[in-house]
Amino acid sequence: MLSLHRLLVASLITVSVQAQSTLFTQVRLFDGTSQTLSAPTNVLIRGNLIEKISPEPIPIDRRADSITIDGSGKTLIPGLIDNHVHLFMAASTQAEMLNPKNSFETLESTAAAEANRMLLRGFTAARDVGGPVFGVKKAIDSGKSIGPRIYPSGAMISQTSGHGDFRMPEDRSRRFGGEMTRGELMGIGFIADGRDEVLTATRENLRAGACQIKVMAGGGAASAYDPLDVTQYTLDELKAAVDAASDWGTYVTVHAYTPKAVRRAIEAGVKCIEHGQLLDEDTMKLLGEKDIWLSLQTLEEAPHTAPQDTQEKKRTVVDGTDNAFKWAAKYHVKLAWGTDLMFSAAQMKNQNTDIPKLLTWFTPAQALKLLTHDNAQLLALCGPRNPYPGQLGIVAEGALADLLLINGDPLANLSLLTDPEKNFQIIMKDGKIFKNSLHSTLSPEQ
């Protein structure tokens, strides 16, 4: 297995062009919010920002580090955003992470490789809601590795017997003669009970560089020891996390499915709910009234090889998805989208293939707005903890230059997004081109 350092050096080879200015000519724009594409237009990128958008020709500096891209017949859109990822845990299986022969450095290198692939799938930003991704993020931000902008939460915070309690049956609690688990030592999750421990766990994540805090507030579908219906953490414990995060100018998001768990989280001051597929209509209405975000996913049923209990819990969640999307729209809930893919690098391609599922509830333009502009609004909720100040999720003058050039019209055919290798001809993040399959039309100005 490559070390992280060797992998980072090798990954730099995939960068195509780093230009001082880039001009896209004759592209049609989806700006992140519009219902239709623009007429053919020109877009100038200077440094890492969109400097000018005009239907008229735009002059460009005639020097070696300025390039022009002919976008005729193509669509320029904001980079895609996934608001619910677990990069560290998605890149490796549970068995690989539990295997003591696999060092943290090995698992981190695997996560760095997956981050590279994520960017090449067109995801230029991702909110990581649990796992030790600080090292991978630092390497990406410093230019030593390739991947999306990462908004990390750090270790997931769970009560004993909660959704983030990953101990094996034979593992005793550290309070009763046991030791800290491998997952806790790696920073995948913290088991914290009582207000004092929750405060410490929250502050540890903030100290490490968390943008937002992730707390487990209810039972889980994929976890072995907590039923789906249970409510986790007392009100006082949840408020402890909210208070500590608020003192740092950011927010808490919680894993929760049921009305009881969500209502307790709302009372505690939580700003975002992950999942929520089992909510009733009244609780969904309350989310809309309280201006609280709902981060939804289009999850699939568990494989037939999973334990029967896991299959039943996952089926219950999947069955609630339709009502969740419909009621969210009815009550104008602030909606975000993510994938929540876990324990299989091979399945990470579903980041793209899951997108057309949204057409059950949205038009293509509405779905693309959700994947770009709306998701970016949730990223920005971390306020001063935002590691990438600036506008994401839109194509507008002054916005950060995270862009995809697509061969075709995604508003007419959203399935174009399912095959990024074929259809994403330019992938740009922060003004740098990381994929270019238009070598014949991309050339330095002379």
Image (spheres, helix red, strand yellow):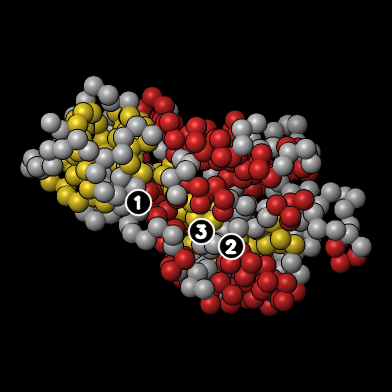
Looking at the rendered structure, the kind of residue marked 2 is Ala
Q: Residue at x 56, y 40 (%)?
A: 5
Q: Is residue 332 visible?
A: no
Along the line of sight, the residue nearer the viewer: 359 or 221: 221
Q: Is residue 284 left or right of residue 263?
A: left
Of discs 1 and 2, which sits in the foreground? 2
Q: Residue at x 13, y 42 (%)?
A: 61
- Whichever of callouts 1 and 2 sits on the residue coming sooner in the sequence is 2
**Crowding at mark 2 (Cα within 10 Å: few <14, some 14-19, many 20+):** some
Quarter-of-image position of residue 40: top left
Q: Is residue 176 left or right of residue 55?
A: right
* Place of residue 403 in the rendered image (x, y in percent of width and height, measured from the top left): 32, 42
How far is disc 1 from disc 3 in space, using C-alphas? 18 Å
**Crowding at mark 1 (Cα within 10 Å: few <14, some 14-19, many 20+):** many
Which residue in the structure is indicated by mark 1?
393
Looking at the rendered structure, the kind of residue marked 3 is Leu
Which residue in the structure is indicated by mark 2?
208
The N terminus is located in which quarter?
A: top right
**Crowding at mark 3 (Cα within 10 Å: few <14, some 14-19, many 20+):** many
How far is disc 1 from disc 2 in space, using C-alphas? 26 Å
How far is disc 2 from disc 3 in space, using C-alphas? 26 Å
| In the image, farthest residue toward the top | 440
Of discs 2 and 3, which sits in the foreground? 2
The C terminus is located in which quarter?
A: top left
